[in-house]
Image (tube, rainbow, N blue to C red):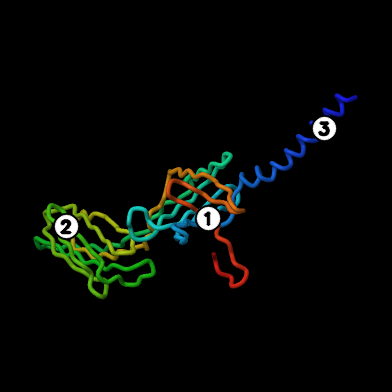
Amino acid sequence: MENQMQKAKNVLNYLVVFFCILPLTLQSQNLSGRYCQYDKGEKIDNCIIFLENNTFIYNGYCRFGDVGSDYGVGHYYIDKNSLSLHFDLTKVSYRNYHNIERKENNSDSISINFRVVDMKGNKIPYANVIIENGEKISKSTNIDGLISFRAKKTKIPKRSLISFVGYQPYEFFLNYDSDYNIQVNLDISHGCNITDEIWNYKIIEKDNQTFLKKKDEEFRKVILKKTNNELE
């Protein structure tokens, strides 16, 4: 009889411990909301948004000093107090394109005329345009987004590179001894797309808050204040 009572007490104690630990275990297996990096108490706009189905979106300052920002999407995995961000869903897409009108001529040189615009057709003044084959010629578009070159016919193909701050650089080749009228449409720079990387963090619970830490980096959950609808 005493053995049965002792067994019952052991089972009861086990169930109490199990149900006390279970909420913590379930909580640690999923993250939700927006976590942003803090440095010396100040929030930095490097943030991770945790979504359903163990997916996340990361957006932050470009690590390589480029115009734009870091951007990445992927799955996250939690093992006890360790978090791994797998950037396996980021899609890299550069939508720059150009249209060409070509016309034959009988001279020993050709004219190459550029018009540089954005995706909505708005002119881009002061864009840098380079024509290169053996020698490099660099010019900037005028206030109407236009620029013209003269080049010798013998130097084919000619590499063209168009760039402007805040836009994706674009490169293509001219392969014919003809006069060219070219419109280049540049897409806005989306910064540094993060692909095929894994970032690891420690999950730390302290003072009813969840922190994500890696070396000198610390991310905290951003709380929406009810009083003035501002983010903390």
Is the residue marked by circle 3 packed among few (<14), some (14-19), or many (20+) residues within 10 Å?
few
Amino acid, disc 3: Lys
Q: Does label 3 or label 2 sit earlier along the sequence?
A: 3
The mark that comes first in sequence, 1 or 3, is 3
Q: Where in the figure is residue 90, as x and y percent of width and height?
A: 46, 50
Closest to the observer, 213 or 33: 213
Mark 2 residue element:
loop
Residue at figure coordinates x 23%, y 57% from the top left: 160
- Residue at which label 3 appears: 9
- At horizontal 11% and vertical 54% (from top left) the residue drawn is 154
Q: What residue sits right under mark 1 in the picture?
A: 220
Q: Which residue is mark 2?
A: 177
The structure residue drawn at horizontal position 38% and vertical position 57%, both measured from the top left corner, is: 191
Q: Locate residue 66: give its quadrant.
A: bottom left
Q: What is the three-letter code of the residue carrying label 1? A: Arg
* Residue most extreme to the bottom: 143
* Residue 62 horizontal side relative to residue 36, left or right: left
Of circles 3 and 2, the one toward us is 3
- As drawn, the label of residue 85 is none
Q: How many marks?
A: 3
Q: Say whether marks 3 and 2 touch (CB < 8 Å).
A: no
- First-in-chain label (1 vs 2): 2
Q: Secondary structure at mark 3?
A: helix
Q: Residue type at mark 2?
A: Asp
Marks 3 and 2 sit apart, C-alpha to C-alpha, by 93 Å
